[in-house]
Every structure is written in C-alpha cells, then in structure tokens.
Image (cartoon, helix red, strand yellow):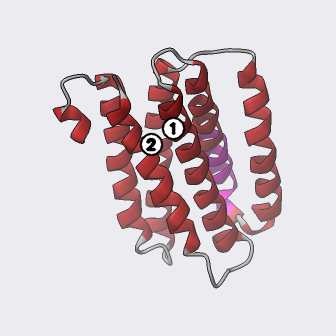
Amino acid sequence: MLSFLKPVQNLTYTIGVTAGLLLSFGGDVALMFQEKRKPFVIGLGLFLLAHVAYAVVFTILGVFSARDLLSAALILAPGAGMFLLIRPNLGTMKVPVLVYIVVISVMVNRAASTLLSPVFEASQAWMVLVGAILFYISDVILAANRFWKPWKYNRISLAFYYSGQLLIALAASCFM
C-alpha cells in the first residue's frame, strides 16, 4: 500500500499485490473458523483467487522462457506428491484441492519468471520468488495438517505465510 505513495511505482504490481493481499485477508478471516467445512471452503476459494491475482501480475510483468518448464516441474512434483499423500482423506474436496495445487504451483512458476524480467531488480525478483515459495510451504503444512496427520506445531505455517506475503508486498516498494 505504501508504494501508492511513491513517486515512482509500478501500478500494475501494486494493484495486483493489493488485490492478492485483500483476498488473502478474507481467506484469513474465513480460516479462523476452519473447523467447519463451509468457512474452510470459502477460505480456500479466497486464497485461490489471491494466488490467481499474484499469478496474473507475475505473468504480466515476468517473462516466458525455457526455464519455465524446469521451474514448473520443480514445483509440480512436490504438489503431485502432496496430493497423492492427502488424496485418501479428501473426500469431496479432491477436485477443489487439486485445482488449488495447480493454481498455487502456477503462481510460484510465474514468480520465478520475474527473475528474468527487466521490470524487476534482481533483489526484488528474489523477494517475489522466495515470498511465493514461503506461501506455498505454508499451504503444504496446512494441507498436511488438515488432510493427512494433525500436527501439534502446525501453526508454524503462519510464519511461512506471513513472511511470504511480506516479501511479495515489500517488493512493490523496490521499483525504481
């Protein structure tokens, strides 16, 4: 939000990230009641839309290259492994969770595309990529806790989540 006040800014990035943060905030509120199915599904949907917002802005400002195939494989492999691990416990959530895994994987892939983009400074692109990866890790922990084995320390996912969001948001202030 502070990047709106900067004389030099990338309005596309700032608006896209602000949309992602607002959708994530809605997801956070919904997940406060995640013990019930409906709030969990609403939270999942809002976070899905946040990942779409991030993926769109990273795609608009990133670049397409042959490296995208490598980063896609690197991120889809653990996503597929996680899906296979939790699949027996998903019930009617199989398709929504699979769609979520694909979308968050695309978001991380598009974050990686910022590394080659002339729009981003190197440090800024790394903030975007590391932030996206941390967000991904937080969702893996959340999914494992919910659909595989409850874990006493599952709240560590929040450290990954907030750190990831912070890095993605702070990257907006690095445009020169």
Residue 147 in percent (x, y) is at: 69, 70
Residue drawn at x 38%, y 43% as measured from the top left: 169
Position of residue 18 relative to residue 69, above or below, is: below
Please rate how many residues cluster around mark 1, counting C-alpha atoms within 10 Å: few if below 14, some from 14 to 19, many from 20.
many
Q: Is residue 142 left or right of residue 58?
A: right
Residue type (three-letter) at the residue carrying disc 2: Ile
- Say whether residue 16 is visible: no
Provide the secondary structure element on which disc 1 rests.
helix
In the image, 82: left or right of 4? right
* View extreme (bottom): residue: 152
Residue position for label 2: 168
Where is residue 13, by image quadrant? Answer: top left
Residue 138 in the image: state x and y as whole percent: 59, 60
Label 2's element?
helix
Q: Residue at x 35, y 65 (%)?
A: 29
Spot occupied by residue 173 in the image (x, y as percentages of width and height): 32, 35
**Image: magenta residue range:** 92-103
Q: Which residue is mark 1?
A: 128
Vertical comparison of 79 with 58: above or below = below
Q: Could you tell me which quadrant the C terminus lies in?
A: top left
Q: Residues within 10 Å of mark 2 (few under 14, many from 20)?
A: many
